[in-house]
Amino acid sequence: MADLVIRGATIVDGLGSEPRRADLAVENGRIADIGSIRDKNAETIDADGLVLAPGIVDVHTHYDAQVTWDATLSPSPSLGVTTAVIGNCGFGIVPAPPSVRDLVVRNLSVVEGMDLDALRAGITWDFESFRDYMGMLRRRGAYANLAVLAGHSTIRTAVMGEDASQRKEATPEELARMKALVADAMANGAIGLGASYSLNHSGYGGVPMPSTIAPLSELDALVGAMGPRGRGVVEIASGAKEPQELEPLVARHGRPFFQGTGMAMYNEQAPERALGLFAQCAAALHRGNGLYFQIPCQPLSFDFTMANAYPFYSHAAFDPIKAYSPEQLKAVFRDPSWREKFRENVKNPRPGMIFQGNWDRVMVAVAHKQSNARYVNRYAAEIAATEHRDPLDVVLDLSLDENLETAFLGRFLNVGDDGVARLLKHEAGVVALSDAGAHLIYMCDAGFGLHFLAHWVRERGDFDLAEGMRRLTSHPADLYGIRDRGRLAVGAQADLLLFDPATVGISPAERIADLPGGGRRTIRRPTGVHGVFCNGIRTFDGKAYVKHAKGPGHVLDTFNPSQGRHVTAIAAQ
C-alpha cells in the first residue's frame, strides 16, 4: 500500500519528457507508481492544475556551518531544493582540529560573507574528522539530501595552520598529510574535492584563501589522492585559469571538473569572452574530458563594505592594504594619491577581475545614518552624475561618514538576458552558483530554481517547462553522479516539488534576525509553491516548514559520475 498519492498533477519528469497528467504514488520514500492509481487508503493530495516535478538539485551551496544549528537549511527547501552539495570552493569546516577552528571560521566569515559572531555562537564542534562530520549530519537529519565536498582550503589549514595562507609551497610531509585527508574524506563518502584559484577569494584580514596560493601541482596531487580513476568530481572556483589549463588534469584523473568564474559569465564589456571559454569546454567534452562551467541564472551579486571590499581586491591599489584595520583603511581612503592610484587601476582591468570600473553596477544597499538614507537603492554612477562628483569619491566619502559600515551591492556580471541565455543553453553549462547559505548579510540567491522557472521558462520562453526542469534536476544530478535523484521515475527517490507554473517565483529580498546570537540575514520566500517533499516526506507545505523530529534528508555517500556519460549527455541535448 502506498504512503502517499498525489492525484491529477501535470507530471514533468525532469528527464525532458513531454508533460502528462497522471497520479503518482510514494512508498517507503520512493516513487512506487505513476499513472492511474486506485489506492484510496493512502494519504492523498489533490494536485489538479498543478505541476509535479522533481525537487531542485543545487550543486553549489555553503550550508556546511548552518546545518550544525539549522536542520531545515532555510531557506533552500522552501524554495524547492531537495538535494544540495556543500563544501564548494574548498571552504568547509572539516577537518576541524581544535587549534584551527577559529581560524577556519574567521576566513569563512569573510570569503563567504557570513556573520562571524553567528558562526562562533552557532557551530557545535562535535566533529573533527570527515567521518565525524558525516556522522553528525546523519544524526541531525537535514530537510534536504546532502552531499559533501572535501575542501582544499580547509584541509590546507588543518595541516599548515596560518602558514596555509602565507606559504605557497607545502613541504613533502605536509602534502602527504593533505593527500591522506583527501583520501580519508573520499573513503567516508565525499562526493569530491572543492578548490579555488579565484583572485577575489580573500579571508580574514585580507589574507588569500589557502588554496588560491597553492601551485597547480598541489591540486593535481590532491585530485590524484581521491582514489581510482573516474571516482568523484572536482568543483573549482577557477579564477583566471582557462579550461585548456585544467583539461590535462581532467584527462589524467578521469574526473569531471566544474568551474565557476566571473570570466565565464556574461559581461557586456567583453560579450564574447564567456562564449569562447564555453567553446573550450565543449571541445574538451567532445574529446571525452568532462569539463563544465557552473553558470548562474541570476545577475551575480557581491555584498561588501569598504572595510572588506573584496570585489576590489584584485586591483593593485589594494595589495598593500588588504590586512589593514578599519582605522588604517580610513587614513588610506582619505589620501587623494591612493584614490588616484585606484582610479588608474580600473582603467585597465585584467580578465578575471570582478570589478571592471563599472560604477553603474555598485548600489548602496544599507546606509546607517538617516542623513544618508537618500542614497539607498541608488547606484554610485547615478549619485555621482547628480552631485557632479566622481563615483569613487561618492563611495569612499559615504563609507568614511559611516565608519566604513555602509553596505554596497555590486551587480557586475551576468547582466543582460540575451547574452546570459546563450550561456544557460550551452552544452558545457550547468545551472548553479546559488551560493545558498553564504553572503547572508545583504543578499540571497537560494531561490535560483524558482527564478529560473519564472523568468527563463514562463516570462522569456528560452526553455519550455520540460527542458527547464531537466536543467534544474536530472542534468546536474547525473553529471555529479547523484543516484536516483532529479527524476520522476518508478524506483527513484521521491524528492518532489508541487507548484503552480503560472505563479511560481521568488519574493523580493527580506531581512530577518534569526541567526545565532540575533544576527541578521537576508532570505527570499517562494511564490506558487504548494509543497516540497524529500524522500516522500513533506518538508514545506507552501506556507511554512513542516515540523519533524528529524529531517528526512539522506546523507549521500555513494556516487557514480563517469567520463563516458558526459559525451552521451551532450549528444542527447
Image (spheres, rainbow, N blue to C red):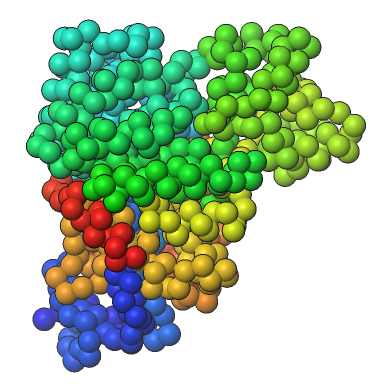
Residue 304 falls left or right of residue 166: right
Whether residue 477 is visible here, answered yes or no, is yes
The percent position of residue 220, horizontal first and vertical second, equals 24, 26
- Which quarter of the rendered picture does the N terminus lie within? bottom left
The percent position of residue 227, horizontal first and vertical second, equals 11, 34
Residue 166 falls left or right of residue 390: left
Decide which of 500, 221 is in the foreground and name it.
Answer: 221
Instruction: Say which quarter of the image contains residue 15.
Output: bottom left
Query: How many marks overall?
Result: 0
The percent position of residue 380, horizontal first and vertical second, equals 76, 36
Residue 79 falls left or right of residue 489: right
Q: Residue at x 18, y 40 (%)?
A: 254
Whether residue 512 is visible here, answered yes or no, is no
Q: Residue at x 46, y 56 (%)?
A: 424
Decide which of 464, 112 is in the foreground and name it.
Answer: 464
Q: Is residue 163 above or below residue 117?
A: above
